[in-house]
Each structure stands twice: as C-alpha cells, then as structure tokens.
C-alpha cells in the first residue's frame, strides 16, 4: 500500500514536471516567432564626431538650395514659354518632351558606360528599354503634331502683328488726309467753349461769331439715331453749326436752365437775322411747361404789338428731334453779366433809373394780363447791344393768378418773397418783391438777401425789416417750420462744436441793418443830385420790401414814385 502511494506521488510529480517543461517550451517557441518593437531608439552603433555632423548639415543645405534654384528656374521657364505661346498646356507637353529626351540621352550614355565596364552594372540606370518600339514611334509622331500646331500658332500671331501694323499705317494715312477737317472741328470746339456763358465770369462772352455754317444733324436718313441727340437728362446735344428745322443755324450756346438750353442762331429765311432758340428738355412735364410758356408769350405779344412794355418778343414754335423749340428775339447779354462787367460796385444812377423804369413797365403789362412771372432775377433780364433797352425773359415759371398754389420753393431763393416761404396765397406782390431785390443788386453790385435756406432767408428779412407780424405768421401754411406756438422765430443753425443741426428760439428780434447805410457804402463820389436820388431809392425799396403783400407798394404806385419819374439834370 505504501509502495502504491509512493509510485502515485512519483507519477504526479513527473506529470507536473512534464507539464512545466511543455509550458516553458511553448513560451520559448512563442518568443521565437513573435518579435516586439522597442519603443526606445537604438543606441548608435558607431560614434560620429561633431565635424562630420557639421559637414552633413552643410551638404543638406547645398541640396536644398539646388532644389530651390531648380524650382525658380522652372517657374521662370514656364512664364517665358507662356508669354511666347500663350498656353500652359503647351508648356507641359514641351516639358515632358524635354524630360523624355534628356532621360533618353542619359540612357544612351549609361549603355555606353556599361559596355565599357563589362558585366558590372551601375547602382542606378534610368532605362526606357521597357517601352516598346511601336509606343516610341507613336509618342514621337504625337510630339511632331504638337510641334506643328505650335508652329502654326506662332505663324498666325506673326500674321496678326503684321495686320496690326498695316491697320496703324492706314489710320495714320487717314489722319493725315483728314487733317484739315480735324483742325476745323477743334476750332469749333474751342469757339463753343468760349461761347458757353458763365454768369460768374469776368469776360464778355457775347462777341460776334463768324463760324461757318455746317449741316451736321438735319439729315433725314439718320432718323433712327434720335437717342444720340439727347443727353441723359433729356437736354438736346447742341453743336455749333447744326441746322435746326431746316432754317436756323446754331452760332453759339447761350446757357442752360432747368427747363431748357438756349442757343443763338441765324434765321436763314429772314436774311440770317439773329434769333434765340429755347430748346425744351425732352420729357412730358417739360413739354407741357413749354406749351404753357408759349401760350403766355403769345398772349403778351398780342397785348404789346408796339413793343413798349419790355417783354421779350416771341417769334414761333416748332418741333425738332422730339424737342419743343421756341424761337425768340435775340439780345446781347443778361443783367447779371452787365453788373459783373460794368457795375461791380453798382451801375451809375442814370442807368439804374432807366432799367428800373423799364422793369416796372414790364410788370405793369403782366399785371394787366393777370400773369405772374414768378422768377424775376438778373439772369432773366436781357439788354440789347447798346445797353439802353431792357427786356424781361424766361416765362417758364409764369402762371395765371388763379392757377398758382402755395409752394415754398417758387422763385430763386435770393429773390423769394416772404409769403412764398410762409405758405401764404400770393399774387403780383411776389414779382414786385423780386424786382426790388434786383434793383438793389443793380445799385450795389451785391445780393440783398443771401440766406442759404428758407429759414435763413427769414432771418435776413428780419435783420433789415424787423420781426414778422404775428397776424401774418398765423396765415402761413408752413409757419410751423420756422415759428413755435408762441410765434417766436426758430433759427436752424449748426452747433460750432459738434457740427450738428440745432434750433435756437429767438424771442426779441429787431432790425440790425439799414438800407440807407448799405446803399451809401457802395456809392462813391456822389453829387448833390445823386444823394437825393439815393434817398429816393432807399424810400422806393423800403416801400416795396414790406412783409404784407397787401400793404406793399403796388406796381402803378411804383411807376409814379419820384425815383422813377424824376429825371436827373
């Protein structure tokens, strides 16, 4: 029994030992076939000195510089090739061909070297031997076709250059042959620039014009080009020498306004007599305004057959290229030009009296016909060549008394009456107010009221004439824009520091300027008679420049005033 147990212990021990042996053997086999990478870098097998490392770094730098140089060279080559042939695809084809040729050349040289060396082969040989002969022939044929296309492109470009040179020569010959026409055209442009009137210039731009008559736009075959005759704003593109309505030859351009531009022309059917033609802008509103003006001018002409009341004479109306045209009598220059040239400090008293009387006579005729001019100013008053006759013109804003409506922007601002600014119903009083402002300007050479807005204009009125009556303010449609609930004036002005618009209430307003003082300031070397006439002028203006139009001096009273009636001796 003991022997059995002992043998059993031995067998179990031997089994355990064999088992451990197997496990150990399997572990060795596993380690034999499974390798694990080390996470730490291997130690250097040989020691490298510092000098060798520096040399390696220098060699790497040289290789990098070579690579950069080659890249720059390639970009320059590409730019040059694109400039020559104008196609980046052609450049790519050429580059591939050049690389293929160079590689083939290297291959040939390497084959020769291999023959000399014998069986020894170099480490690296660029060989294209794997390419079959048929493929090489097809590639070469393709390259030939591409080269042929490039040559054709080059030839066509050379032909284009030659054609451009020929075209330039033709243009030069044309310019040489038309030299006389160009000189004439430049002369016309220069003359046109001289004749375009600037009302603020110091020159007399109303000299006679001797430009030859040229027909340029009256050809009926060019009827489809009607759009080219107008500018963007609907004004007619007038040129000196054009013939209008097969009758009027344009000699100069006098000016341009809101409604039309005005030219001076010769009437061929009337023996080349000078006329002024007002060419209305090409739109419906201006056309209706032009028709209204022509009807008012006809009415004035019929009422003044003897030409005594100093309104410009109306000749006829007609259509030209879609524009309504009004033919009027031609005069020499406007009153603003007269003041600029002859009266920087005011016209002489004799001329002032004569002009004032003629202007009042024109207003007398308009009142008789119930017509309000509504735009009296020096620009709309013309004088003849002798400067002794005055005529009122530009009736584009004119209307009948019953047709007007309150609007704050009627009449040019410096000549605008207070009832227009406040929105009070108006009549002929607005014209007499504007006439007084114009007469003051003729007497001094300066504008009387120079407000930059309607609000500033009211302030200018009150500087000369004092506070506006409360009774009159209450009638105004636009009074709330300028007065508060206490009828105190609200002055709109900019803040000196911030630059923003602010409103200042002014309670006590009194006159700070005197007409007599201002008139004397511009009068020099006055005689006793001139002193008397100056005081009469001051009274004449003060009786007109009254806020209430009903209390303002009427036109008939103006004609009877001593300043108009008394003849200077």
Image (cartoon, rainbow, N blue to C red):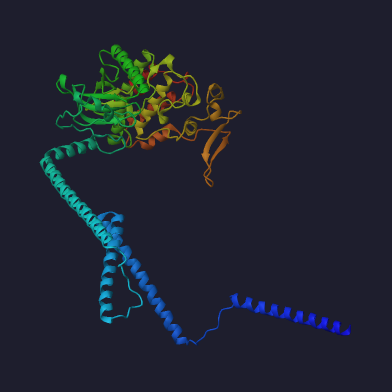
Q: Nearer the viewer, residue 342 or 2?
A: 2
Q: Residue furthest right?
A: 1
The image shows residue 97, relative to residue 362, as above or below, that is below
Residue 532 visible? The answer is: no
| Residue at x-position 58% and y-position 35% | 505
Q: Quadrant of residue 241?
A: top left
Which quadrant is home to the C terminus?
A: top left
The image shows residue 308, relative to residue 384, as above or below, that is above
| Residue at x-position 36% and y-position 77% | 123
Query: How many numbered circles are shown?
Result: 0
Which quadrant is home to the N terminus?
A: bottom right
Q: Nearer the viewer, residue 256 or 480?
A: 256
Q: Nearer the viewer, residue 176 or 269?
A: 176
The image shows residue 106, relative to residue 152, as above or below, that is below
Q: Quadrant of residue 542?
A: top left
Location of residue 190 in the rendering, given as x and y in whole percent from the top left corner: 20, 39
């Amino acid at each position: 029994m003991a022997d059995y147990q002992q043998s059993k212990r031995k067998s179990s021990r031997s089994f355990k030992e064999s088992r451990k042996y197997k496990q150990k053997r399997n572990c060795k086999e596993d380690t034999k076939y499974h390798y694990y990478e080390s996470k730490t870098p291997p130690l250097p097998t040989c020691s490298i000195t510092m000098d060798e490392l520096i040399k390696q770094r220098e060699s790497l730098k040289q290789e990098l510089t070579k690579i950069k140089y080659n890249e720059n060279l390639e970009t320059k080559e590409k730019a040059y090739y694109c400039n020559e042939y104008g196609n980046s695809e052609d450049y790519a084809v050429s580059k591939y061909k050049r690389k293929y040729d160079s590689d083939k050349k290297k291959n040939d040289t390497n084959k020769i070297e291999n023959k000399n060396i014998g069986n020894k082969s170099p480490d690296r040989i660029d060989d294209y031997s794997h390419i079959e002969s048929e493929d090489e022939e097809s590639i070469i044929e393709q390259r030939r076709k591409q080269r042929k296309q490039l040559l054709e492109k080059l030839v066509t470009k050379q032909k284009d250059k030659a054609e451009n040179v020929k075209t330039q020569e033709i243009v030069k010959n044309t310019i040489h042959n038309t030299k006389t026409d160009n000189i004439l055209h430049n002369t016309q442009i220069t003359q046109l620039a001289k004749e375009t009137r600037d009302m603020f210039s110091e020159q007399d731009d109303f000299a006679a014009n001797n430009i030859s008559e040229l027909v340029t736009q009256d050809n009926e075959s060019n009827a489809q080009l009607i759009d080219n005759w107008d500018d963007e704003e609907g004004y007619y593109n007038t040129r000196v020498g054009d013939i209008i309505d097969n009758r009027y030859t344009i000699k100069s351009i006098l000016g341009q306004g809101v409604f039309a531009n005005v030219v001076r022309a010769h009437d061929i059917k009337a023996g080349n007599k000078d006329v002024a033609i007002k060419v209305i802008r090409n739109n419906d509103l201006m056309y209706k305004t032009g028709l209204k003006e022509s009807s008012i001018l006809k009415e004035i002409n019929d009422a003044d057959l003897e030409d005594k009341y100093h309104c410009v004479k109306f000749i006829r109306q007609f259509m030209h290229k879609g524009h309504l045209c009004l033919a009027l009598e031609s005069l020499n220059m406007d009153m603003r030009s007269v003041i600029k040239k002859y009266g920087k400090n005011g016209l002489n008293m004799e001329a002032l009296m004569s002009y004032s009387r003629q202007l009042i006579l024109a207003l007398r005729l308009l009142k008789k016909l119930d017509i309000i001019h509504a735009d009296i100013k020096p620009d709309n008053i013309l004088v003849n060549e002798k400067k002794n006759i005055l005529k009122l013109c530009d009736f584009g804003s004119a209307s009948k008394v019953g047709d007007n409506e309150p609007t704050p922007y009627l009449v040019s601002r410096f000549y605008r009456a207070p009832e227009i600014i406040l929105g009070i119903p108006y009549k002929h009083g607005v014209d007499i107010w504007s006439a007084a402002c114009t007469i003051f300007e003729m007497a001094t050479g300066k504008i009387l009221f120079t407000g930059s807005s309607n609000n500033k204009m009211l302030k200018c009125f009150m500087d000369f004439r004092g506070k506006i009556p409360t009774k009159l303010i209450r009638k105004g449609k636009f009074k709330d824009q300028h007065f508060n609930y206490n009828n105190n004036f609200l002055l709109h002005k900019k803040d000196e520091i911030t630059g923003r618009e602010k409103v200042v209430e002014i309670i006590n307003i009194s006159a700070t300027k005197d007409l007599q003082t201002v008139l004397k300031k511009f009068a020099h070397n006055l005689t006793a008679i001139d002193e008397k006439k100056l005081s009469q002028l001051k009274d004449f203006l003060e009786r007109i420049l009254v806020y209430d139009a009903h209390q303002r001096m009427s036109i008939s009273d103006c004609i009877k005033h001593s300043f108009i009636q008394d003849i200077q001796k």
